[in-house]
Image (cartoon, grey):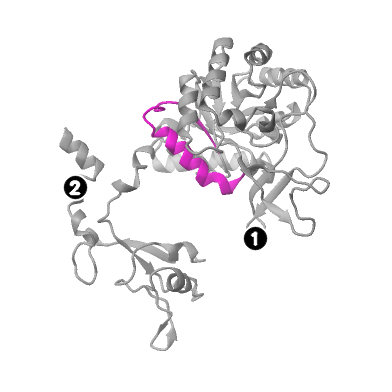
Amino acid sequence: MADIRNDFVGIKSPNPFWLASAPPTDKEYNVRRAFEAGWGGVVWKTLGEEGPPIVNVNGPRYGAIWGADRRLLGLNNIELITDRDLHVNLREMKVVKRDYPDRAVVASIMVPCEEAAWKAILPLVEETGADGIELNFGCPHGMSERGMGSAVGQVPEYIEMVARWCKANTRMPVIVKLTPNITDIRYPARAAKAGGADAVSLINTISSITAVDLDSFAPEPTIDGKGSHGGYCGPAVKPIALNMVADIARDPETAGLPISGIGGVTTWRDAAEFLALGAGNVQVCTAVMTYGFKIVEEMIAGLNNWMDEKGHASLDDVIGRAVPNVTDWQYLNLNYVTKAKINQDSCIKCGRCHIACEDTSHQAITHMVDGARHFEVIDEECVGCNLCVNVCPVEDCITMVELESGTDPRTKKPINPDYANWTTHPNNPGAAKEAAE
């Protein structure tokens, strides 16, 4: 069986599946149950400084987006960092780490952007035996209005400064959690690296309003007739998270910086995709809040089975494997041509492919042939956009077939003659590199 033991910046865990800093990691009771279910590590819900207690709303804290089958696609939350006493959390962390020495216990921290505040809390966390700290520079609601969370994560200079403070005042690995509420994720990642951070984790939640109550005209969740923007997470944010992870993994200035991938991880396949794009492990939240701690069993089994099937002996065989295949648009092979093909045995004649193509694309799918309802691709008109594949309700009913040498079925000539010899074309990065050598 494949070896899925994880070593992330020296923090060891039996598998790469960690729970993200969130309600599921708010107390000892939860974390013990998570470890018994098989989770490899946890990032304890964000700790704040000593002082006035954090007060959360005593009403709805979540908004939601559902699919047509009521499957939860995304959650918007307005919950703040832990409202439990700092020293209660620290005592519980110490006990949990003592009882589960083989599991990763990382403390998420958010305190004011002052060196004294960070210097005060770091030794308290270190005394628990925690394996590392995660600097919460991502939360977009509540705390950001107080000059913390994403208010720090949106300013690279602040990220670098606080990372330096922490590296100078603790032995623990420092992970910087990045906010997606920024134009270019590479800049905060570069700042974290410049500040000496051992790793970054991303993405934190996306600033959002999921719905408006059209009776009260207040955003949801609604608290006494008012609402606030919150942090959006869940399966819907996975594409954004994957892209940002890839951006950091392929940026020459952050090359080699370890990444903990977060954002919509629900299955082993999601996790494998994050790993392939450069993440060293993954963190999970919404999936657990939807299905419970035991989903990790399927994640572990699925990842093991896939790695065995593909011959991957360890996580190192997977991590970063897809990064070289992420490129910029101008380097795509313009002489690569595919056409859609409909399997008539699988087709249920719903007509969705025809409607999508006829109304919004290239009028390349029939709906009637010889007076009978029949859907077939017209090669001469098909541009290979694959919209029909994505709207078809029957899996694998429509597939994309590559044409030899990218030829036009009418003329038998290359679709883009300027790119006919792609292997030697100067726009091909591989060819350009070979020519330079």
Q: Is residue 55 visible?
A: yes
Q: Where's residue 177, x and y in %?
A: 57, 29
Q: Position of residue 131 (x, y in %)?
A: 59, 19
Q: Do callouts 1 and 2 mark residues in contact (Cβ within 8 Å)? A: no
First in sequence: mark 1 vs mark 2? 1
For label 2, the residue is 425
Q: Taking 237 as reference, is 110 left or right?
A: right
Residue kind at label 1, given as amino acid type: Asp
Q: Residue furthest bottom?
A: 371
The vertical placement of 399 against 114, above or below, is below
**Magenta highlight on residue 241:** yes
Q: Is residue 338 above or below residue 432?
A: below
What SS does tag 1 mark? loop
Residue type at mark 2 is His
Res 418 quadrant in image: bottom left
Q: Nearer the viewer, residue 306 or 436?
A: 436
Count of numbered marks: 2
Q: Give the camera-side residue of 327 and 41.
A: 327
Q: Looking at the picture, does residue 116 appear above or below residue 302?
A: above
Residue 8 visible from this viewpoint:
no
Q: Of discs 1 and 2, which sits in the foreground?
A: 2
Which image quadrant is residue 282 in?
top right
Q: From the image, tell me which residue sits under label 1.
A: 69
Q: Helix or strand or loop: what does disc 2 sit on?
A: loop
Is residue 95 rendered to the left or right of residue 104?
right
Q: Residue 355 magenta-drawn? A: no
What residue lies at 56% left-to-right and 38% top-to-bottom? 181
Q: Which residues are magenta?
A: 233-262
